[in-house]
Amino acid sequence: MELIYAIHTKGSINNGNIDIKELIDYYCNVFNTDAGDYYRIYLNIRNRKDSRTIYLDALRNDFLKKMDADDNK
């Protein structure tokens, strides 16, 4: 959900001209999953104490580590 909300906030799909529900439905269809109560999930993300973007932070860190490792080959 963090990734989908970030994509929506950035306006990365259709120049931002897409409703969050439509975007979530699309990704759920692609990944054959159910989003559940995505507004509640968003509220839970907002209420996190340490990092609000745990998944996005991990994606970024792992990608940077991969590039650093590839630079050192």
Image (tube, rainbow, N blue to C red):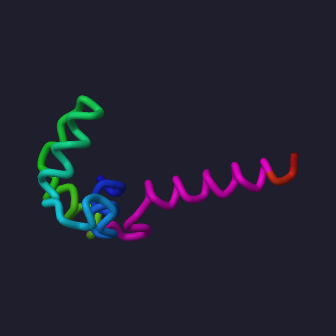
Compared across the picture, whether 62 is left or right of 2 comes to right
Residue at the farthest right position = 73
Magenta-tinted stretch:
47-70
- Picture residue at 24% right of the left edge, 29% below the top: 32
Compared across the picture, whether 50 is left or right of 31 comes to right
Q: Position of residue 6 (x, y in %)?
A: 34, 63
Residue 36 in magenta?
Answer: no
Q: Position of residue 21 (x, y in %)?
A: 12, 53
**Which residue occupies the foreground of this view, 28 or 34?**
28
Q: Position of residue 24 (x, y in %)?
A: 20, 49
15 over 71 or under it: above or below: below
Q: Quadrant of the C terminus?
A: top right
Compared across the picture, whether 33 is left or right of 36 comes to right
55 over 48 or under it: above or below: above
- Picture residue at 27% right of the left edge, 34% below the top: 30
The chief SS type of the magenta part is: helix
Circle count: 0
Residue at the farthest top position = 32
65 over 28 or under it: above or below: below
- Picture residue at 20% right of the left edge, 51% below the top: 23
Residue 42 falls in which quadrant of the image?
Answer: bottom left
- Picture residue at 14% right of the left edge, 43% below the top: 36
**Which residue occupies the foreground of this view, 62 or 41?**
62
Residue 52 in magenta?
Answer: yes
Q: Position of residue 58 (x, y in %)?
A: 53, 55
